[in-house]
Image (spheres, rainbow, N blue to C red):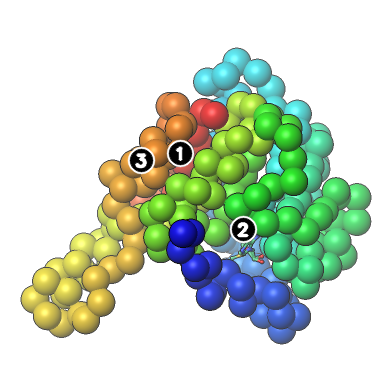
Amino acid sequence: MAPPRPPKLESYRSEQVAQAYDQRWAGRGGERRDRRKARALERALRSLERRSGKAARSLLDVPCGTGRFAGLLLDRGLDYTGADLSLEMLSMARAKAPAARLLSADAARLPFDDASFDVVICVRFLHLVRDPALRTGFLRELRRVARLGVVAGYHHSRTLRGASRRLRHKVGLRERPPANPSPARIRADFAAAGFGELDWITVHFAPLLSDKVLVAARA
Ligand SMILES: C[S@@+](CC[C@H](N)C(=O)[O-])C[C@H]1O[C@@H](n2cnc3c(N)ncnc32)[C@H](O)[C@@H]1O
């Protein structure tokens, strides 16, 4: 039996949560984080293009949320499709990118044929899925609809903060073990989902200070 969906993932089906989420990327701090992620995304797309020897023309962004990357990817000339489970998040994406093709869909069962898109991106999603089997299930479905590959964001454990949390847990100063998966566990997720070569693209210029990574994986 499939494990239950993480409650945090369901919480985005609320107008207040959608609005609060979108506000995270407003202001100077939010815009700076957006630009950093956009640069990493561009590096990840180029990695897949280089490894496959083909240019990406079509892209599925799932979950697309409030359309954080829709404008950027449309401007890159990509045939863009955004999918998300939450109608509230999608309606904010629609306001931001009226030209984008957007639809409501479950990332676990995408309504597309095999190899429908050159690239599939999945940002700020898998870090909310703590169960490795569930993560692998999502990755397998993303891979199914991708021709060249998948770019998936993770929050990993190999940072200074991660090391401090592990130590505090070991000596009894922290109750719960830290939840972020190790790089080895992340590679194991991709292997279990049937992916080939991977590129590990750190989002921050000082990788030990940030747990964010984009993994570009050949389908
Ligand atoms: C943290 S947001 C990330 C959105 C976007 N990728 C970004 O970077 O801003 C997580 C999104 O996952 C969506 N979501 C949750 N479960 C989903 C599922 N099973 N299939 C598709 N989208 C889902 C939520 O509605 C929410 O918009």
Amino acid type at image mark 1? Ala
Disc assigned to residue 187: 3
Circle 2 packing at 10 Å, graded few (<14), some (14-19), many (20+), is some
Q: Determine the residue positioned at 91% across, 50% down.
A: 99
At 12% from the left and 80% from the top, the residue drawn is 172
Q: Residue 75's image quarter?
A: top right
Among the two numbered marks 2 and 1 on one chain, the one whose residue lies closer to the N terminus: 2
Q: Tell me if residue 27 can be seen.
A: no
Task: Say which quarter of the image contains residue 155.
Answer: bottom left
Q: Position of residue 73 (x, y in %)?
A: 74, 43
Q: In the rendering, at what x and y percent does residue 149 appear?
A: 58, 31
* Numbered badge on residue 67: none
At numbered mark 3, what does the secondary structure look like: helix, strand or loop? helix
Query: Any mark on residue 34, and which?
Result: 2
> In this view, which residue lies farthest toward the front?
1
> What kind of element bears circle 1?
loop
Of callouts 3 and 2, the N-terminal one = 2
Kindly identify the amino acid type of the residue bearing the numbered disc 3: Arg
Contact between labelled residues 2 and 3, with CB atoms less than 8 Å apart: no
